[in-house]
Amino acid sequence: MTDGSHHILRQFEADLQKLRADVLTMGSRAQENLRNAVNGLINRDVELCNRAIVEDEDVDKLEIEIDHEGMMIIAKYSPVARNLRRVVSTMKVSQNLERLSDQASNIAKRGRKIAGNAEIPETASLQLLFDLVSGAVRDSLEAFTKGDVKRALTFDDRDEEIDRIYKELSKKITKRLEEDSSHTKDYVDLLFIIRFLERVGDYAVNIAEDAVYSESAVDIRHGRAHPDVS
């Protein structure tokens, strides 16, 4: 490899690391928005809900910047094979983080409405689902950052657990909705909120799948065969 090729490769790696660092910043902000939204809901803190809604705009702006950076890298270096996968996968992670933050905003908007009404105990029952979902997001981002394929392949089981808790909560809240007509709107809002959290769990799975594809070139979406990591 010539000195010129080495120089170009170093430039590519530097630009890619900048792109990935920006995605991690975006991930931190999206996760903070989700925490603020759920804590605002559970603690009836309207200010936290408002913060999650307002700061969702910052995440939207970061997604636009990351898309631009990624396209510039592709145009400048014409990467192929693994290098192209690394760029494209990073951009896809950004898209999932933007959707995550949108769901945080949705939770916060409904949380504000619930906070304006008499308190219902079922709100606190969302904590377990949030803990599972937020842990999945954190770990999927770490697997992507470290290129940890083995860890990324564990997310099918975690997604099943999230789905199980979601279904249990849905049944519980639906039962209360049928029994207590004085809080109909609040229970409907809670049903939407747990659905939003379940969707965030799906985004964590998507990020884990991007980690696998980036490192192994194997697309495991929709139940396809997993790579051998033994």
Image (cartoon, helix red, strand yellow):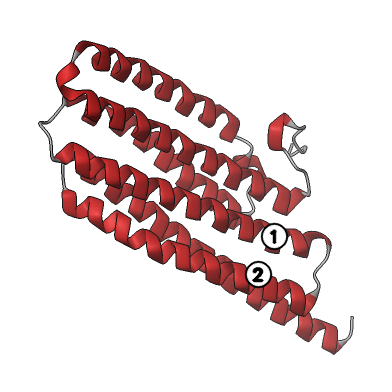
Residue of label 2: 70
At label 2, which amino acid type do we have?
Answer: Gly
Mark 1 touches mark 2? (CB < 8 Å):
yes
| Residue 158 placement (x, y as % from top left) | 52, 30
Up-down: is 145 above or below 183?
below
Give the structural element (helix, strand or loop) at label 1: helix
Q: Residue at x 42, y 52 (%)?
A: 101
| Residue 107 placement (x, y as % from top left) | 33, 43
Query: Quarter of the image containing the N terminus?
Result: bottom right
Q: Earlier in the sequence, mark 1 or mark 2?
A: 2
- Residue at the far bottom in the pictured view: 4
| Residue 71 placement (x, y as % from top left) | 68, 71
Q: CA distance from mark 1 to mark 2?
A: 7 Å
Query: Which labelled disc corresponds to residue 88?
Result: 1
- Can residue 41 be seen? yes
Query: Quarter of the image containing the C terminus?
Result: top right
| Residue 58 placement (x, y as % from top left) | 40, 66
Up-down: is 121 above or below 88?
above
Structural crowding at the residue carrying mark 2, measured as other residues with C-alpha within 10 Å and reported as few (<14), some (14–19) or many (≥20):
many
Q: Nearer the viewer, residue 188 or 95?
A: 188
Relative to 85, 192 lies left or right: left
- Residue at the far right in the pictured view: 1
Query: Which labelled disc corresponds to residue 173?
Result: none
At label 1, which amino acid type do we have?
Answer: Val
Structural crowding at the residue carrying mark 1, measured as other residues with C-alpha within 10 Å and reported as few (<14), some (14–19) or many (≥20):
some
Relative to 214, 137 lies left or right: left
What number of labels is visible?
2
Q: Nearer the viewer, residue 45 or 17?
A: 45
